[in-house]
Amino acid sequence: MWRDDALLLDMLNAATEAVSFAAEVDQPQFRASRLHQHAVIRCLTVIGEAASKVSREFRNQHPEIEWQDIVGMRHRLVHNYGAIKLDVVWGAVHT
């Protein structure tokens, strides 16, 4: 489905950007840089938002992808923004 292709491309582009932003700094620098934090968090929210819109059919065809975890992270980043754990964000970009 073309819409899934577009959403998957959005996810790939955002993931590529997040990895690129995080590669510019080490973990202590990331913790100190609001700029890098915001850039990576924005990318993760785009990934989660796009994942939530991928068709159920496609998600069912790819159970190896942790769709609920991806979308859940987006929800935590957006709705619980005051309690974001930067080590979790860092880990998400590096695993």
Image (cartoon, rainbow, N blue to C red):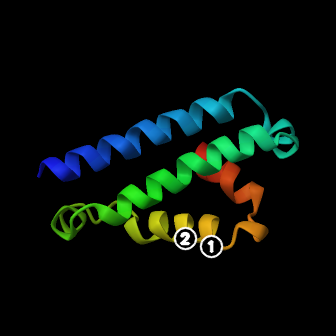
* Circle 1 Cα neighbour tier, 10 Å, few/some/many (<14 / 14–19 / ≥20): few
Local SS, label 2: helix
Name the residue beneath numbered marker 2.
75
Identity, as a three-letter code, of the amino acid under mark 2: His
Q: What's the CA distance linking mark 1 and mark 2?
A: 6 Å
- Location of residue 63 in the rendering, given as x and y in whole percent from the top left corner: 28, 66
Name the residue beneath numbered marker 1.
79
Left or right for 10, reference 34? left
Whether residues under marks 1 and 2 lie with C-beta atoms below 8 angstroms apart, the answer is yes
Residue shown at 18% from the left, 63% from the top: 61
Residue 95 seen in the current view: no
Q: Is residue 9 above or below residue 90?
A: above
Residue 76 seen in the current view: yes
Residue shown at 69% from the left, 59% from the top: 88
Residue shown at 65% from the left, 41% from the top: 39
Q: Quadrant of residue 55?
A: bottom left
Specify the farthest residue to the top: 24
Identify the mark at residue 49; answer none if there is no mark.
Answer: none
